[in-house]
Image: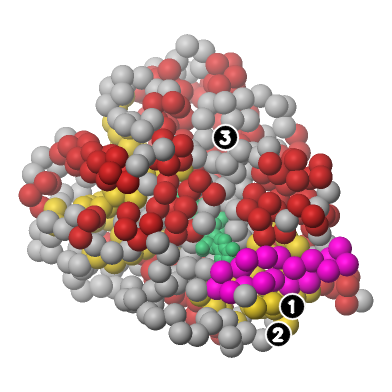
Amino acid sequence: MTTQEQTSGFNLKAEGKRVLQGSSGGRVEKKHNPVEKAKGEYDVIVIGAGLGGLTGANVMATQGYRVCLLEQHYNYGGMATWFRRPGGHVFDISLHGFPVGMKKSMRRYWSQEIADSIVPLESIKFDNPQFSFETEFTREDYTNKVVEAFKLDRAHVERFYDHLRKMEYYNDDGRTIREMFNEFFPGRNDVHRAFMEPITYANGSTLDEPAITYGIVFSNFMSKGVFTFSGGTDTLIMKMRKILQQNGVDMFSGAQVERVLVDRDRVAGVRVNGRDIKAKTVLSNANIKSTVLKLVGEENLNPDFVQQTREVRLSGSSCQVYIGIKQGEEIPFITDLLFCSTADHFTSEELCDLRTKSRTFSFYYPKTRPHLKNAGFTIVSSNNARWADWQALSDEEYEVEKNALIDRTVSHLEQYIPDVREKIDHLEASTPRTFNFYTQQMQGASFGTKFEGLDVSMKLSEQVPGLYHAGSVGIIMSGWLGTVNYGVITANKMAEYLHEVSA
Ligand SMILES: Cc1cc2nc3c(=O)[nH]c(=O)nc-3n(C[C@H](O)[C@H](O)[C@H](O)COP(=O)(O)OP(=O)(O)OC[C@H]3O[C@@H](n4cnc5c(N)ncnc54)[C@H](O)[C@@H]3O)c2cc1C
């Protein structure tokens, strides 16, 4: 069995020191500046090739602007990424599920071919001491299941959905999710669990977040079920790269943006790997807090805005365990997504605990990558995690906790596949430290920031004309769909700005 100590890339050793690698994963000597072929000036510079940056870059390029995309990592995709391991394993990091809206966004802003590869998950299961059921997670099927499992009045559940659907960003009544649940389902921890657990797994939000964030995310999912990309994250990102190339975007990996340049109160370009490149507009896909506080710098900003940014809370982070099944071995079809827990009842705190008893298993069968001849089986377990818990550990303690996490996870999996341990030939874990290391998201935040980050993100261009942000922020603009759509919204604002300044 290969363990995380024996592999390279997503592990503690690599987390300790930054190395520049080729896209094959092999180490490359850093002989030249990866951005030496960049032009001296662009209409648009995009910092970061996460889904927000990639989409923003593409929208601007299709409108005829000269676009340069700068990514510090050797790979593109940010959190929407994958990695390979010996034994033919390909592990997807964040391809667990997104709403149907992704199909439309991909068709409009990427390609019909990408949109056509978006397919529904067949099955989602919930299993915990309070309830156990399987659902397609469509509105109709899920409603049937909760009405039956919790003996609820169907009309009341429908009223709850209607209430959620009417929620709007500009019409927020300031209530928390807890308050809303207590109004609709008082004293029903089991019902709160059924409605909240999948959303907490999905974006780390707790019962104390604004109800508006829940309303928008839940309503997005609760229509036609949960969708995935057939072909895997690698295929998606490769297709996106090809489209960007065809649209004339200059793309550079290994390109660390150190500074956003501001001249006469407007954005002027960026400093990347020690080189200044000019631009009329800059779109940052880095975390909004690092964009404001590190890349722009306080001296270029209004002190109130700086203070507002400091007060923005980051979203939670995650741990994952990557489980590779030996070539030639098979696992039975369990479900696509299994939300499971051995905790007696539901609390947001338990879900984020260092040693949580709650996790989501994503099962990747050969159907995930139908184009591969020998596509195997992999399983990725995800659980919510706090940066502070993992950051506090010494290197030795960190290794011990990672191994304990792996053990707990495999034991949990054995409840569903009793002989799985002997079929596994690869095990590896990632933590908030890993996500921070690879994407530079502050504290390894999986979903950028809590709700209040959205306001800061949207006001950035008022502070520094020409500078914009698009990326996971405020829960609403997070996840694959939220981030892609935010990339589009921001790109359109940038195009308007460019139109105005060139008029
Ligand atoms: C474990 C996990 C599971 C998830 N599961 C799901 C899921 O099932 N469904 C879903 O919809 N969402 C999921 N998400 C969330 C989703 O992946 C993210 O919301 C989304 O991919 C974030 O995109 P982004 O563009 O905001 O940022 P990121 O993906 O973080 O991209 C930012 C990019 O900017 C680059 N960068 C940062 N700073 C600089 C700099 N100074 N110079 C150059 N480059 C820089 C980074 O390297 C990175 O590539 C998951 C996230 C995690 C962590």
Which residue is identified by label 2? 40
Is label 3 or label 2 in front? 2
Which percent across, then down, holds residue 60? 69, 73
Q: In the shown orientation, is residue 328 left or right of residue 490?
A: left
User: In the rendered structure, which disc, 3 or 2, sits on the residue that comes first in sequence?
Assistant: 2
The CA distance from mark 3 to mark 2 is 44 Å
Query: Few, some or many C-alpha atoms within 10 Å of disc 2 (few <14, some 14-19, many ≥20)?
Result: few
User: In the rendered structure, which disc, 1 or 2, sits on the residue that comes first in sequence?
Assistant: 2
User: Considering the image in quadrants, where does the N terminus appear?
Assistant: bottom left
Kind of element beneath mark 3 = helix
Residue 278 is marked as 1
Viewer-proximal residue among 230 and 311: 311
Viewer-proximal residue among 151 and 476: 476
Query: Few, some or many C-alpha atoms within 10 Å of disc 3 (few <14, some 14-19, many ≥20)?
Result: many
Kind of element beneath mark 2 = loop
Kind of element beneath mark 1 = strand
Which residues are drawn in magenta? 255-273
Dot 1 and dot 2 residues touching (CB under 8 Å): yes
Query: Few, some or many C-alpha atoms within 10 Å of disc 1 (few <14, some 14-19, many ≥20)?
Result: many
Residue 214 is marked as 3
Which percent across, then down, holds residue 166? 67, 34
Three-letter amino acid code at disc 2? Gly
Q: Is residue 462 above or below residue 275?
A: above
Which percent across, then down, holds residue 497? 83, 67
Disc 1 residue: CB within 8 Å of ligand 1: no
Residue positioned 55% across, 44% down in the render:
220
Q: Is residue 168 above or below residue 302?
A: above
Disc 2 residue: CB within 8 Å of ligand 1: no
